[in-house]
């Protein structure tokens, strides 16, 4: 990507969001999403807007035994002006029991869309399932 | 996706763009991209802005023996307000010789980002390689 500053800012936000998910501070977390953002909760189920996204994260955290820890691996940033597509290898860590019971893969190739709103980069689309949604 | 109208408008644009690529009308094609759009030409090589994208398409067309025909398969639309992520199974058809000589896969899982600019949906990021860029 050309715009290294944007990449660094977004990278920090992703790390901060991963931390907020781990410590379950979802009120703070949703401030990093646009007002009309979409979160793909699971294939076929989307949450729209901050309230729904917050509720979804509470349920996702419970599903993973309140032990969820997202960690990013390799990342690729593509910029289209005030819109950035982040491709990310994402590892979802959780308690042994939660991992065993999960019907979803714990290693994913995610697609995140960030949009510049005022001075801030916010997540507009959070799809941790990436192009694997085409399989469902 | 919630917004069916946006989905229909974008679907028409993608079909029109596929047609314009096939008939090599690249001046018309680039009007469907934002001013600062990014096209992933191949892993590690990006074109930025309409002029570069036009030049890239001329070279891509030559690479495929001027016989390139993109066809979309299954598609998934995710909306984040005035930004839409399209996940698409994309088939690249070309002459037998061109396919044989190509070092790239002809069946891809693409990620396209569309952005509403005024009344029009324009492509801001065109990445036909999808999350496979994480492998390179």
Image (spheres, coloured by chain):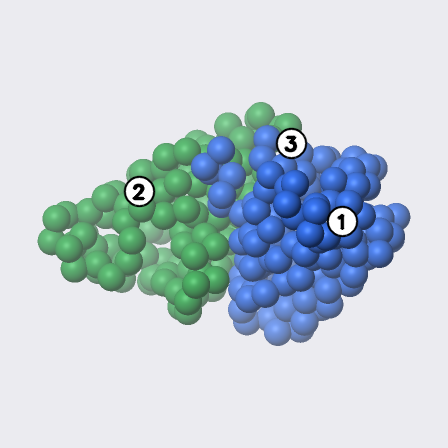
Chain colours: A blue, B green
Q: Chain of mark 1?
A: A
| Image quarter of residue B135 | bottom left
What whole-number distance in Å separates the C-alpha atoms at marks 2 and 1? 33 Å
Residue B64 visible from this viewpoint: yes
Seen in the image, is B68 located left or right of residue A109? left
Q: Along the polypeptide, which appears first: circle 1 or circle 3?
A: 1
Mark 3 nearby-residue class (10 Å; few <14, some 14–19, many ≥20): few
Share a chain, discs 1 and 3? Answer: yes
Which one is closest to the eye, mark 1 or mark 3? 3
Q: Residue at position x 64%, y 45% from top?
A: A100
Where the C terminus of chain B falls, by quadrant? bottom left
Seen in the image, is A105 located left or right of residue B88? right
Q: Chain of mark 2?
A: B
In the picture of the structure, the residue carrying the numbered disc 3 is: A45
In the picture of the structure, the residue carrying the numbered disc 1 is: A33
Locate residue B50, reporting x and y percent.
Answer: 44, 58
In the picture of the structure, the residue carrying the numbered disc 2 is: B91
Locate residue B88, reporting x and y percent.
Answer: 43, 41
Q: Residue at position x 57%, y 54% from top?
A: A107
Locate residue B126, reporting x and y percent.
Answer: 46, 52
What whole-number distance in Å separates the C-alpha atoms at marks 1 and 3? 18 Å
Q: Residue at position x 51%, y 39% from top?
A: A133
Frontmost residue, B118 versus A125: A125
Give the tally of numbered discs: 3
What whole-number distance in Å separates the C-alpha atoms at marks 3 and 2? 27 Å
Q: Chain of mark 3?
A: A
Frontmost residue, A52 versus A67: A67
Where the N terminus of chain B falls, by quadrant? top right
């Amino acid at each position: 990507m050309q715009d290294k500053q944007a990449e660094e800012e977004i990278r920090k936000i992703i790390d901060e969001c991963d931390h907020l998910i781990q410590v379950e501070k979802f009120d703070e977390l949703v401030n990093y999403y646009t007002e009309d953002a979409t979160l793909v909760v699971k294939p076929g189920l989307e949450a729209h807007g901050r309230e729904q996204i917050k509720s979804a994260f509470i349920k996702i955290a419970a599903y993973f035994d309140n032990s969820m820890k997202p960690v990013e691996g390799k990342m690729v940033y593509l910029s289209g002006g005030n819109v950035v597509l982040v491709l990310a290898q994402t590892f979802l860590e959780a308690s042994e029991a939660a991992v065993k019971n999960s019907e979803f893969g714990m290693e994913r190739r995610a697609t995140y869309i960030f949009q510049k709103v005022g001075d801030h980069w916010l997540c507009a689309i959070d799809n941790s399932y990436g192009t694997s949604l085409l399989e469902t």
